[in-house]
Amino acid sequence: MGKAANVSPGADIHPGVTTITMSDPFPSAPDADGGQFVNLLIEIQPQLRSFIGHLMPMVDSRADLLQEVNMVVWKKRDQFTMGDDPAKAFRNWAYT
């Protein structure tokens, strides 16, 4: 998971103001470099967009639903196992 936020008095900037900074706003993905999961998620975007388009007649809602799907996939990333064919494994996993 990600690192905790650092909270410190912002006296050097504005007296009486508390400054919050995030040292790691995005938790790492389950693979060693954190990039392969993100790449797999990016690669599947056109297929997810098409799938959602077939299910939803309202064009305006499609982007919102795709974003919600991406958030669910990201939150459940620790449940994903790469396997021998990561792209196929990811596609099957993401659609369930």
Image (spheres, rainbow, N blue to C red):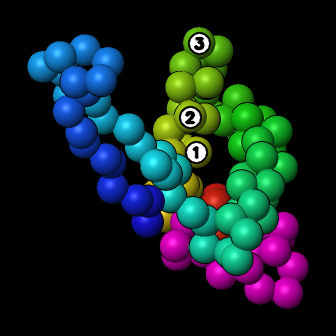
Q: Are marks 1 and 2 in contact (CB under 8 Å)?
A: yes
**In this rendering, would 10 be left or right of 81?**
left
Label 2: how many residues lie within 10 Å, few (<14), some (14-19) or many (20+)? Answer: few
Cα–Cα gap, marks 3 and 2: 13 Å
Residue occupied by mark 1: 70
Q: What residue is drawn where x is 77% and y is 85%? A: 83
Name above or below for residue 79 compared with residue 48. below
Closest to the camera, between mark 3 and mark 2, is 2
Q: Nearer the viewer, residue 51 or 21?
A: 21
Residue occupied by mark 3: 60
Q: Nearer the viewer, residue 66 or 58?
A: 66
Residue 84 is covered by the magenta coloring:
yes
**In this rendering, would 13 be left or right of 40?**
left
Q: Tell me which amino acid carries mark 2.
A: Gln
- Secondary structure at numbered mark 1: helix
Residue occupied by mark 2: 67
**In this rendering, would 31 be left or right of 16?**
right
Q: Where residue 87 sits: x, y (%)?
A: 84, 67
Mark nearer the N terminus (3 vs 2)? 3
The magenta-colored residue range is 77-89
Q: Where residue 61 sits: x, y (%)?
A: 55, 19
Q: Tell me which amino acid carries mark 3.
A: Asp
Image quarter for residue 3? Answer: bottom left
Name above or below for residue 12 compared with residue 72. above
